[in-house]
DNA sequence: TAAGGGGGTATTGTATACAATTATACACCA
DNA sequence: TGGTGTATAATTGTATACAATACCCCCTTA
């Protein structure tokens, strides 16, 4: 029997607030109050505070006596995030290639094909969603919750900056091709190749998003 | 003026529970209840739950309808942790060497000298404390909250397994020497060397803790 | 005898009431 | 006029009361 785990309000509030902050709904330095969230979300302070504690742990907000200080993700954070991802995201794909199941592979493939489809349709929002999901699936399928917990927060924090990237059609096409190469390596269970292609992909994404591209 | 930030009960409970779990006070699979914690800690459920949400985010517990399920850190987790630390901890030291201030350097040095002192005294508990603090200071002084947030949880999760390591006097001496080399490189602001020595140190620690040492 | 349903209990999940702390504005004094 | 102390208001921090849910045991019945 499938256990249909009910999602608590605390969890829902966390997801929503995290998403709003990481997509740039609030400015860094802005201060909210818990009571404002109570009226905005229609939920009592208890689950809101449980969510806020987690957001504080991720260092994207700070709970101060004046209210909830929005920190978000700075450009400097972004540089550090990519410096780290370049060093470990390949390891994630390496492990994934070694232990992925056929069923998981099918889900990864479907995500990739949707991404390719939306690239031809030039639908940036959906491209972004599938691009992001592709990476997240690899984190999940690599078989290590430690890798997942390490990479997931870094990946999520790039959200706001990723959108501009996929709106560039040339980059969107290139990104899809790179994902295809990573997928093929994983499907062939060629760990070394999957790692190599992933590192190259993160380097390219980093260069594009950080606007360090050589002309 | 120094702002003397008062530490909330939620924060204190988090620190205490995290420490108890990561030092192995509870067995993996064991189930506690919030009410038990209320009577143990003399604090109401509210701050306890805020702490539990954070521990759940770190994947060292799980909040289930039956109670608080202890997950802790498995041997497999440990392997993944070191695989990741080998790849990024050098980067942390690299940055640290580049931007550390004289004041921070003094604190790092004092910690190292205490470690060396306790090694001669053969005091495993204090060796462990100073060994751990040395790494944590580098995370702090590297100037990136992203690096800090990434490495700190990984480092903390090794706690339980580190103790056995420092009780081996030969390894304790070697570890102190390695820290000394890292410190000297950082003090000389030689980023490349600091990175090199740090990677070697993590590899050695990994080999020793994971008992993969070549005989 | 085995399978399925129902009630009771223990637990977490949520809302609300109360306490404590902090910042701010303002008055007062040097 | 500047600084300092105090009172007040707004916010977070904590405790408690209430709701919902899942599980377990036992009873019933085919």
Image: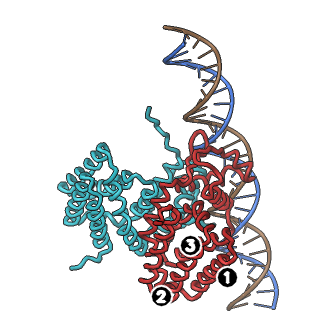
Chain colours: A cyan, B red, C blue, D brown
Q: Is residue A127 above or below residue C29?
A: above
**Cα distance in 3D space between marks 1 and 2:** 31 Å
The mark that comes first in sequence, 3 or 2, is 3
Q: Is residue A110 above or below residue A67?
A: above
Query: Furthest residue to the front?
Result: B215
Name the residue: 66% across, 69% down: B124
Which residue is labeled 1 in the image?
Answer: B1
Q: Which chain is indicated by disc 2?
A: B
Q: Is residue A134 above or below residue A82?
A: above
Please give left or right for residue B146 compared with residue B170 in the image: left
Q: Viewer-proximal residue, A192 or A106? A: A192
Dots 1 and 2: beta carbons under 8 Å?
no
Q: Nearer the viewer, mark 1 or mark 2?
A: 2
For label 3, the crowd category at 10 Å Cα-Cα, with few meaning under 14, some 14 to 19 and many 20 or more, is some
The mark that comes first in sequence, 1 or 2, is 1
Whole-percent x and y of residue D22? Answer: 55, 34
> Are both tags, 3 and 1, on one chain?
yes
> Are both tags, 3 and 2, on one chain?
yes
Name the residue: 38% across, 72% down: A83
């Amino acid at each position: 029997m499938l256990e249909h785990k009910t999602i608590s309000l605390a969890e829902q509030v966390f997801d929503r607030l995290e998403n709003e902050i990481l997509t740039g709904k609030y400015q860094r330095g802005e201060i909210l109050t818990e009571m404002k969230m109570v009226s905005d979300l229609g939920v009592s302070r208890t689950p809101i505070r449980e969510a806020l504690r987690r957001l504080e742990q991720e260092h994207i907000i700070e709970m101060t006596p004046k209210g909830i200080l929005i920190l978000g993700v700075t450009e400097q954070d972004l540089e550090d995030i990519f410096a780290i991802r370049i060093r470990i995201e390949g390891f994630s794909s390496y492990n994934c290639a070694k232990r992925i199941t056929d069923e998981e592979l099918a889900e990864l493939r479907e995500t990739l094909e949707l991404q390719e489809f939306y690239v031809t349709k030039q639908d940036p929002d959906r491209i972004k969603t599938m691009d992001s999901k592709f990476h997240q699936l690899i984190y999940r399928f690599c078989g290590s919750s430690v890798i997942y917990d390490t990479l997931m927060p870094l990946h999520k924090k790039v959200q706001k900056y990723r959108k501009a990237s996929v709106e560039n059609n040339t980059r969107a096409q290139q990104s899809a091709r790179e994902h295809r190469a990573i997928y093929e390596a994983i499907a062939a269970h060629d760990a070394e190749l999957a790692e190599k292609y992933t590192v190259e992909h993160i380097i390219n994404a980093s260069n594009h998003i950080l606007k360090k591209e050589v002309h």
